[in-house]
Image: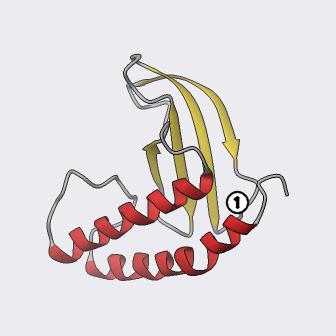
């Protein structure tokens, strides 16, 4: 998927956060972009949550990537519920239905209330 993007020349490194599990996978991917003005770091978040990939040189940690994911997901859910199509929201691999938005919101509540607090207290080296 990432190598298929026309703006990615090469994948340099892939890092899996050691706190990842079957239910939540967080990867940071260093790429060689097509041009120098493009981001050279991508975050991939997948698992029980809808998959997304976003640029993230300004997002230094997995926890901050998950917080960004949560913020963007809330916007996506609001857009689906309001039936608006905003270009200011990152792509999520999820159907744009009210049922999907409801299920996504339930997953986000688990992320916010259970996963993020746990990840903040766990070391990435464990």
Q: Please count the marks in the image.
A: 1
Residue visible at 38% across and 58% down in the picture: 92
Does residue 44 sit above or below 13 in this rendering? below
Tag 1, which secondary structure?
A: loop
Is 62 positioned to the left or the right of 105 in the image? right
Question: Where does residue 96 sit, x and y in percent of width and height?
Answer: 27, 68
The residue most toward the right is 126
**Residue under label 1:** 20
* Quarter of the image where the C terminus is located: bottom right
* Near-viewer residue (59 or 3): 59
User: Dot 1: within a 10 Å radius of its alpha carbon, few (fewer than 14), some, or many (20 or more) residues?
Assistant: some
Which of the two residues, 47 or 20, is positioned nearer the viewer here?
A: 20
Could you say where residue 75 lies in the image, as x and y percent from the top left? 29, 66
Residue 1 visible within the image: no
* Residue 99, percent from left and from top: 32, 82
Is 94 positioned to the left or the right of 43 in the image?
A: left
Q: How is the protein colored in the picture? A: secondary structure
- The percent coordinates of residue 111 (x first, y second) are 55, 74
Above/below status of 30 relative to 105: above
Going by the image, does 37 lie left or right of 81?
Answer: right
Question: Is 7 placed above or below 81 here?
Answer: above
């Amino acid at each position: 998927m990432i190598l298929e993007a026309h703006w990615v020349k090469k994948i340099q490194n892939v890092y899996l956060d050691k706190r990842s599990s079957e239910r939540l996978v967080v990867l940071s991917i260093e790429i060689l972009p097509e041009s120098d003005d493009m981001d050279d770091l991508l975050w991939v978040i997948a698992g029980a949550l809808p998959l997304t990939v976003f640029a993230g040189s300004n997002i230094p940690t997995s926890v901050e990537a998950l917080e960004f994911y949560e913020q963007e997901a809330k916007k996506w859910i609001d857009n689906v519920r309001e039936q608006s199509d905003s270009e200011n929201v990152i792509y999520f691999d999820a159907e744009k239905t009210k049922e999907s938005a409801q299920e996504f919101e339930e997953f986000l509540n688990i992320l916010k209330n259970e996963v993020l607090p746990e990840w903040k207290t766990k070391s990435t080296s464990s």
